[in-house]
Amino acid sequence: MFIPMGTVVTVAMIVCVIFSNRLPAGGLNARTPGFVLRTIGTFCVAAGLWNVLWYAKRHLTELWGQMALGSGLLLCASGTLLLVAPERVPARLEKARHVMVLALAAFAAFYAFTLYRL
């Protein structure tokens, strides 16, 4: 028995959305130990790299290849934000965080809805 990679990537996107946002009072990641955030960040970056370097590379002319490219790049960027100490994140990237999290949430919703319909 194996878990389909689409499910793994969808879970990675959902987890990344939950931990990457900075809600008032720091959000969930302000209360989470650093090693847990780094583990989650590593998982998200790994899923994003798989999406970009394996799936998107082979299926770029198809809808799911383009979805994999977009979601994979966002997973890598958002996962990297979890790996880096908050004070070391460049200001431009910190300003783009909310847009990245919102876009990643949209990708996650599309993936999840598609998986549900299967």
Image (cartoon, rainbow, N blue to C red):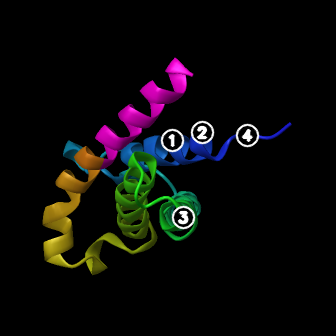
Please give the residue where the numbered disc 4 appears in the rendered image. Answer: 3
**Residue shown at the point (39%, 47%) measured from the top left:** 63
Which portion, as a residue range, is magenta?
104-118
Q: Amino acid at mark 2?
A: Thr
Please give the residue where the numbered disc 2 appears in the rendered image. Answer: 7
- Number of numbered tags placed on the structure image: 4
Please give the residue where the numbered disc 1 appears in the rendered image. Answer: 10
CB atoms of marks 2 and 4 within 8 Å: yes
Q: Which mark is residue 58?
A: 3
First in sequence: mark 3 or mark 4? 4
How far apart are the alpha carbons under marks 3 and 2? 19 Å
Q: Residue furthest top?
A: 117
CB atoms of marks 2 and 1 within 8 Å: yes
Quarter of the figure with residue 105? top left
In the image, residue 13 sits, relative to residue 46, either above or below, namely above
Q: Is residue 57 left or right of residue 43?
A: left
First in sequence: mark 3 or mark 2? 2
How far apart are the alpha carbons under marks 3 and 4? 20 Å
Q: Amino acid at mark 1?
A: Thr
In the image, residue 67 sits, relative to residue 109, either above or below, namely below
